[in-house]
């Protein structure tokens, strides 16, 4: 689970991020916003759950889904390898 000590700042763009420990033991930077999602094998989003799993699905707005998770900061950082 995420704790306050896992907050940080992206060295590339300067945005605030969280670090999620993945099932593999590695840390992944994610955006701060938590999103509701619905699992969907044809979905375009990869959602990182607070317990370190990556699920494919759709981000939901204003409705409940299968869970809540984060978007990888690698996907949203404007300066990451661009």
Image: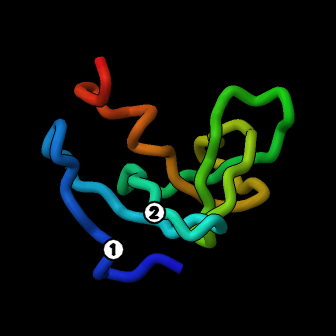
63 or 78: nearer the viewer: 78
Q: Quadrant of residue 24?
A: bottom right
Q: Is residue 39 left or right of residue 50?
A: right
**Residue 46: mark in rendering:** none
Q: Is residue 31 above or below residue 22?
A: above
Image vertical order of residue 15 relative to residue 6, above or below: above
At horizontal 62% and vertical 61% (from top left) the residue drawn is 49
> For mark 1, what is the residue?
6
* Label 2 secondary element: strand
Q: How is the image coloured?
A: rainbow
Q: Secondary structure at mark 1?
A: helix
Q: CA distance from mark 2 to mark 1?
A: 9 Å
User: Residue at position x 42%, y 52% from top?
Assistant: 30
Of the 4 image quadrants, the one containing the N terminus is bottom right
Residue at image position (46%, 76%) is 2
The vertical placement of 42 against 62, above or below, is above
Q: Is there CB contact under 8 Å for labels 2 and 1?
A: yes
Q: Sequence-wise, which precedes: disc 2 or disc 1? A: 1
| Front-most of residues 27 and 20 | 27
Q: In the image, residue 31 lies at what x, y percent?
A: 38, 50
Question: Circle 1: is it few (<14), some (14-19), or many (20+) Cα within 10 Å?
Answer: some
Q: How far across and down, in percent of the image, does residue 15 sit? A: 20, 46
Whether residue 11 sits left or right of residue 7 in the image: it is: left
- Residue to which mark 2 is pinned: 27
Q: Residues within 10 Å of mark 2 (few under 14, many from 20)?
A: some
């Amino acid at each position: 689970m995420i704790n306050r000590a896992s907050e940080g700042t992206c060295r590339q763009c300067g945005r605030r991020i969280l670090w999620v420990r993945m099932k593999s033991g590695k840390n992944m930077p994610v955006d701060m916003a938590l999103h509701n999602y619905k699992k969907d094998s044809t979905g375009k989003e990869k959602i990182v759950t607070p317990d370190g799993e990556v699920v494919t699905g759709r981000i939901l707005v204003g409705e409940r889904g299968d869970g809540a998770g984060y978007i990888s900061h690698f996907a949203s950082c404007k300066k990451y390898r661009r």
